[in-house]
Image: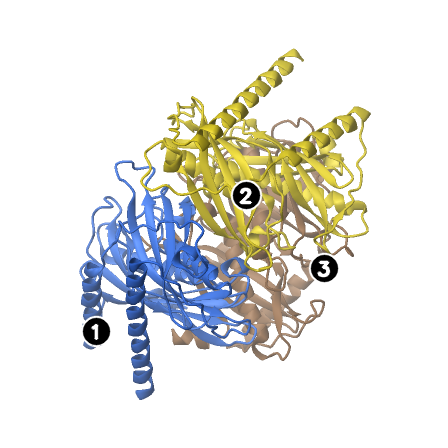
Chain colours: A yellow, B blue, C brown
C-alpha cells in the first residue's frame, strides 16, 4: 500500500454501498462494481495521459478484459477500489483495478473483483484525434515484456471480434417457460448528463451497468430466484456514445450449465442529436450469472430449452466459453498452489 | 413561518432544476415535474390521514386528473410546489398541487402546472385494509359541494376505465418511418429501494416518471426533434407495486394532430418476490407531446401512418380526446376572460 | 400562501428521507442534511442578490459556521428546511437555516439542525468579479448590530484559517487498531454536471456531503459501531471548484473524548479541464461523530492511540476545540434556562 500512495501511476478510493446499489436480497449489483472500476480507470488514465502531453485529452474506454466476481458484496460494506497503470503502448494505457470489500464493523476484508481495462487518449479539441500516451517506467524489464504480450493478445482478439450488428433479438409471442424467448429482455435508456464525461460521451461504466441490469433481468426471469453476476467476458467498445442518444440494451440466454447461466447482451445506439449517423451497435458481451439461496450458496439452474438451430449453435459456442474459462480457472488455481 | 406549521391542509416546497432533470435542449422532463407533484401530494395526505386516526396509515396514490403543462421549465430555475387538501370523502383525499417556476436571476415567476390527485389511506398493519379519512373543514359550503361533484365524477370515470390488460404492444420487423410500429418503445426497470415508500411500495411519482420517459422516446423517434410533455390524461392506479418488481413500460403512438402527438403508455408488473401473483397491468395512460423549435415555438408534426384497423380505431378515439380537451380549454379561457 | 411569495427574505422546503439518504441503521447522514441546508441557502441568497442588482449574479458559498446536529433523523421522516436572510454586508449575505424533522405518521416534530451560512455574489459574466449585495431592512436596529458583530467575528476567523495544503495524509503499512493510521481514509470523486450550478461550479453542499462520508468511514473504522454526525466545525470555502475536476477527500482521526471522535477532513482538487492551475486544497474542516447503541444512546468510544509528536499536537488542539464547544453549549443552555 505504501508504494501505491507515493506512486503517480496508482490511485485509491472508497465508497459505502447503499440500498440502491444492491438487489432486494442485499447483494450489490455487478453493474455497480463495474461502474466504480471504470471510474477509477478513467481518472488514473486521464491523469496519466495529461501528465506530459502538450495537448489536453481525456481517456476513453476501449476494452475490458474478462473478469470474475470472486465474492458478493453487501449493503453497508465499504468498497475499496485501487487502480494501477501496468502498461502503456504508443496509443493505449492498460489499467489494473482491484476491488476489495470491507465490513467496517468487523474489519473483515475480501477480494471482490480484479479487472484489466484499456484506454485510449482522445484530444479535447478534436474528439476524432487519438493522442500519444506518455510511456511509464518499469521496475523490471520483464514487466514491460509481459505487458507487451497482453497488449498484442488483446489487439488480436479485438480484431477477431465480429460485431453481429444484424443479429437482432426478435420477440416471440407466448413463449414457453425456460425457452430463450421466455426470458429475453430489452430496455431503452435516454442518456442523461450525469452519465457523461464533461466532453459529452457516455462513461463506459454506465454502459456496463445497463448491460448488467438487462442480463440480470434475463437471468431472474429464467430461474426466478436471487441471482448475482459471476463473471463478464471481454467487452470491446468500438464507438463512443454521445449525450442525448437513446440506447437499446437487449439480452438473451445463450447457455446454461448446472449452476450458471450465460446471457448475451447487445447495446444499440440511436444518435438523436447527430442525425448524420444511423442506428449502430456499440457494444456486445457475455455475462454469466449464478442463482443463490438465502444462505448464499449456488443453486441448480433450470436448463434452457432450445427451439431453433441458431439457438443450438449459440449454446455450443457458450459451452465452449464455459469449458475454456473453467480450464483457465483450474490452471490459475494450480499455478497458485505451486508457488 | 409559524403559520405554515399550524396550517394542516397546505404544504410548500422548492427545488433547483438540474441537468439530470432535463433533456439536452434544457427543458425539464414532464416526468420530473409529475414526480415532485406526487411527492408533495403524498406528504400532505399522509400527514392529514394520520392527524386524527387511531390506526397509523400511509396515503397511496389512486388517481391523477388530466393535467396540462402550461409552460416549459428550464435548468437552473427553481420549482415551487404547493399542495393543498381540497376535499375529503369517507375513504379518499383530494389534493390540489400548483407548480410555479421561478427564474431566481430575473425574479420572473410563471405557472407551470396545476394538478389534482386522489389518495386513499392504507393501514400500516394490514396493507389490504383501507382506513377512514378525517374530514376537513370548509370555509364555504359551496367548496364542499363542488368537491363532492368532482369526487362523484372521478368515481364514475374510474369505473369506466377499461384496463385492456390483454392489449400488448407487439413488435414489428423493419417498420416504415412514421408508422406506429416505427416509434413504439419499451423499457424494463427493476424497482430500487429509493423509489419506494418505507412500506415497500413504489411511489406513484416514480411510475409516472418512467411513463413520461417512454412516451418521450416514442415522440422523439416519431418526429426526431426536441419534444416536451404538453399534457397527461387522467391516470388510475389500480394496484400497488411492490419493491423488487420488474416493470415493463411500453408506449405507442395513437394519434397526431398538426402540432401534437398522443402516446398510449402501459405499465406491466412482474412481482419477483411474491410469486403467488402473475404478471399484471398496473397503470395505463395517454401522454401528449409537442415538438419545439430552438426558439421554443411549436413545430408541425409528421402525421402518423396507420396500417391496421386497430390502429385506425385508436386514432379515432385519440381524435375524440383531442377535440374534447381543445373544447374544454376554450371554455376555460372563455370563463376566465368573462371574470 | 400569498404571504410567502411576497416575503423576499425567507424560503421553505420539505423532502421525504429515503434509504439512500441514510446509513444501514436508518439514521440520515449528516452530509444529506448539510446538502439540503446549502441548497436552501443558495436559492434564497441568489434570489436576493439579483433582486435589485443590474448585473446578474449567483451566490457562492463562502463559509458555514459551526453547527450541531441536535437529534438524528430517520428514513421516512420529512425534513422541513427553512431559510432566512439575517444580515447583509457590502459583499456578503448571511443566511440562517433551520431543519426540523417531522414524523408524518405521529405528527411529532423536532429540531434537527440550525446552521448559519455566508454567501458572496459572483457575476455571471465574469466569475472573478464579486458584486455588491442589496441591503436588507431590519425590523429592529439591534438585529443589524448583532449581525454586524457576527460578520466581523467570522471575517477575523476566516483570515486566521491557515490552510495547511502541504499537510498530506500518508498511508501507514499494517497499522495497529485504534491508531490514527488504522482508520484514516481517502476517496476520489469525479465531479458530474448534476453536482454543479448552471455556471459549472460544484455546489458547496455536494462537497460537504463527500466530507461527511469520509469522516463517517473514519469513525466507523475506529469504533466499529453505528455512528452519526454530532457537529461540524466552521468550514471556509476558499476556492470555487469547477465541473470536470477530480476531488480527493481524505480524513483522519485527531481527537477522541469519552463519547465522541473528531475527524479532520481535507478536500484537494485536480482541475483536469483548466490546465493553468495545479492541484490545490479547496476546503478543510473538523467533523465530530458519536457512536450510538441500537436504542439510540451514546456509547463510549475507544481512545485513539497516538504514535507521533504531530499526532499528539493535533490531539491537544482537538481537545481545545472540544472543551471550547462544551463550554459554549453550557453557556447557551444556561442563558436559555435563564430566560
Chain hosting mark 1? B
Query: Which quarter of the rendering shows the C terminus of chain C?
Result: bottom left
Residue B169 against residue C142 in the figure, above or below: above
Q: Do the numbered discs 2 and 1 sit on residues whose CB atoms are within 8 Å?
A: no
Gap between marks 3 and 1 measured at Cα: 63 Å
Residue A129 rendering spot, x and y as whole percentages: 74, 51
Q: Nearer the viewer, residue B292 or A31?
A: B292
Residue position for label 1: B146
Q: Residue C159 carries which label?
A: 3
Would residue B259 be seen by someone viewing this image from the given angle? yes
Residue B39 rendering spot, x and y as whole percentages: 38, 58
Residue position for label 2: A165
Residue B104 rendering spot, x and y as whole percentages: 54, 72
Q: Residue furthest top?
A: A338
Left or right relative to C1: residue C209: right
Instruction: Report whether mark 3 lies on the same chain as mark 1.
Output: no
Would residue C28 be seen by someone viewing this image from the given angle? no
Quarter of the view holding residue C135: bottom right
Q: Comparing marks 2 and 1, which lies closer to the viewer? A: 2
Which structural element holds mark 1?
A: helix
Residue C93 against residue C289 in the figure, above or below: below
Gap between marks 3 and 2 measured at Cα: 62 Å
Mark 1 burial class by Cα count in 10 Å: few <14, some 14-19, many 20+: few
Residue at 67% over, 26% down: C174
Gap between marks 2 and 1 measured at Cα: 59 Å
Quarter of the view holding residue A236: top right
Q: Do the numbered discs 3 and 2 sit on residues whose CB atoms are within 8 Å?
A: no
Amino acid at each position: 500500500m505504501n508504494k501505491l500512495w507515493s506512486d503517480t501511476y496508482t490511485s485509491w478510493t472508497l465508497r459505502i454501498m447503499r440500498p440502491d446499489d444492491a438487489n432486494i436480497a442485499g447483494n450489490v449489483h455487478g453493474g455497480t462494481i463495474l461502474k466504480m472500476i471504470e471510474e477509477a480507470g478513467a481518472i488514473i488514465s486521464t491523469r496519466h495521459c495529461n501528465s506530459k502531453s502538450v495537448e489536453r485529452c481525456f481517456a476513453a474506454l476501449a476494452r475490458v478484459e474478462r473478469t470474475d466476481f470472486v465474492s458478493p458484496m453487501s449493503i453497508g460494506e465499504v468498497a475499496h477500489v485501487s487502480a494501477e497503470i501496468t502498461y502503456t503502448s504508443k496509443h493505449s494505457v492498460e489499467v489494473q483495478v482491484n476491488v476489495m470489500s470491507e465490513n467496517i464493523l468487523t474489519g473483515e476484508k475480501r477480494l471482490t473483483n480484479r479487472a484489466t481495462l484499456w484506454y485510449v487518449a482522445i484530444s479535447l479539441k478534436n474528439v476524432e484525434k487519438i493522442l500519444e500516451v506518455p510511456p511509464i517506467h518499469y521496475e523490471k524489464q520483464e514487466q514491460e515484456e509481459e505487458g507487451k504480450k497482453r497488449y498484442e493478445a488483446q489487439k488480436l482478439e479485438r480484431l477477431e471480434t465480429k460485431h453481429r450488428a444484424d443479429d437482432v433479438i426478435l420477440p416471440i409471442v407466448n413463449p414457453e417457460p425456460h425457452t430463450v424467448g421466455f426470458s429475453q429482455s430489452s430496455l431503452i435508456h435516454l442518456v442523461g448528463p450525469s452519465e457523461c464525461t464533461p466532453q459529452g460521451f457516455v462513461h463506459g461504466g454506465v454502459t456496463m451497468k445497463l448491460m448488467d441490469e438487462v442480463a440480470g433481468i434475463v437471468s431472474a426471469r429464467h430461474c426466478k430466484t436471487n441471482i448475482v453476476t459471476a463473471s463478464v467476458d471481454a467487452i470491446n467498445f468500438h464507438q463512443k456514445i454521445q449525450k442525448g442518444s437513446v440506447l437499446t440494451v437487449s439480452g438473451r440466454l445463450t447457455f446454461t450449465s448446472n449452476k450458471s447461466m450465460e446471457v448475451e447482451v447487445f447495446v444499440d445506439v440511436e444518435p438523436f442529436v447527430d442525425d448524420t449517423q444511423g442506428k449502430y451497435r456499440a457494444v456486445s458481451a457475455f455475462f454469466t450469472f449464478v442463482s443463490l439461496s438465502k444462505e448464499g450458496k449456488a443453486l441448480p439452474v433450470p436448463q434452457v430449452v432450445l427451439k431453433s438451430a441458431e439457438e443450438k449453435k449459440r449454446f455450443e459456442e457458450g459451452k465452449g466459453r464455459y469449458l475454456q474459462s473453467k480450464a483457465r480457472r483450474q490452471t490459475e488455481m494450480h499455478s497458485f498452489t505451486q508457488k
